């Protein structure tokens, strides 16, 4: 007998679970289309129903709070070399040769910034995660869930928005407000065709 659908069009009548053949199916997985019983039924972060196998393979959107803290950590880390440079300037200001302090401070600021930026680029190229994102258990991927290249992340998510913001100061505000949409994608995510998701093991 072919499975029949009830009036709601959600639960199949007469179908058996793909993983437990003795159990009646209560839903159809939105990802693979297989029948799932109540034991295998899972509800994803998007509100759709999935089987237990697919739910473990899916990426879930990062929380807005995780993206905020990750960005804050990245900004603080990038500012550390300049903080160290300021400390050096203040210390040498009390000496007989404050000019030496300026040279060292400049070296710390520029060299440290390049070192931090290089390390961040290495992390992003390796896993789609900056230091802040790694700490929060999130990463940047394409909108279809595939890995995002370093060029896409660097140019389309960072350089292009920075150029647009230089021409229009309101861009950064509009960009940030886009995160309150259901898909939690900022404007720079849409430009780069990316999204930020939870790393496997951090999902619901």
Image: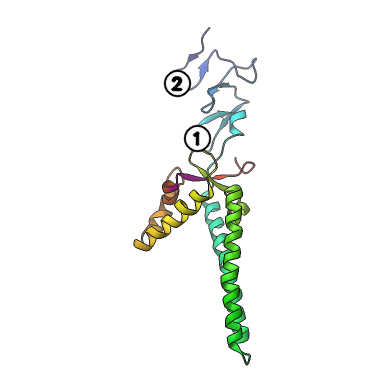
159 lies left or right of 53: left
Give the camera-side residue of 151 and 78. Answer: 151
Q: Going by the picture, which residue comes out furthest to the left?
A: 168
Residue picked out by circle 2: 9
Q: In x, y percent, where is residue 4? A: 48, 13
Q: Which comes before the other along the chain, label 2 or label 1? A: 2
Q: Is residue 195 magenta?
A: yes
Residue 27 drawn at (x, y percent): 53, 23
Res 29 seen here: yes
Q: What main secondary structure does the magenta stretch of the protein show?
A: strand
* Figure quadrant of residue 32: top right
User: Above or below — where is 175 with respect to 147?
Assistant: below
- For label 2, the crowd category at 10 Å Cα-Cα, with few meaning under 14, some 14 to 19 and many 20 or more, is few
Query: Residue 177, relative to residue 47: is it above or below?
Result: below
**Does 88 appear above or below 128?**
below
- Judging depth in this view, the residue of 20 and 160 nearest the camera is 160
Q: Which mark is residue 98?
A: none
Judge left or right: residue 66 versus residue 173.
Answer: right
To which residue does mark 1 refer?
Answer: 47
Q: Which residues are magenta?
A: 192-196
Residue 185 placement (x, y as % from top left): 45, 47
Work out whether residue 129 can be spotted: no
SS of the residue under disc 2: loop
Q: Nearer the viewer, residue 86 or 150?
A: 150
Q: CA distance from mark 2 to mark 1?
A: 16 Å
């Amino acid at each position: 007998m072919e499975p029949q659908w009830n009036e709601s069009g959600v639960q199949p009548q007469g179908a058996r679970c793909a993983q437990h053949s003795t159990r009646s199916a209560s839903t159809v997985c939105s990802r693979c289309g297989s029948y799932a019983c109540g034991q295998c039924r899972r509800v994803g972060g998007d509100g759709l129903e999935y089987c237990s196998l697919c739910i473990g393979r899916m990426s879930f959107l990062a929380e807005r709070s995780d993206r905020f803290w990750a960005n804050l950590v990245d900004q603080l880390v990038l500012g550390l070399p300049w903080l160290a440079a300021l400390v050096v300037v203040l210390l040498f200001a009390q000496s007989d040769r404050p000019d030496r302090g300026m040279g060292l401070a400049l070296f710390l600021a520029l060299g440290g910034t390049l070192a931090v930026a290089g390390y961040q680029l290495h992390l992003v190229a390796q896993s789609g995660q900056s230091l802040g994102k790694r700490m929060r258990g999130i990463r940047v991927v394409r909108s279809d869930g595939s890995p995002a290249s370093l060029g896409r992340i660097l140019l389309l998510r960072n350089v292009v928005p920075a150029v647009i913001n230089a021409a229009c100061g309101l861009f950064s505000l509009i960009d940030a407000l886009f995160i309150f949409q259901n898909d939690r994608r900022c404007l720079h995510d849409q430009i780069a065709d990316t999204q930020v998701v939870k790393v496997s093991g951090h999902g619901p």
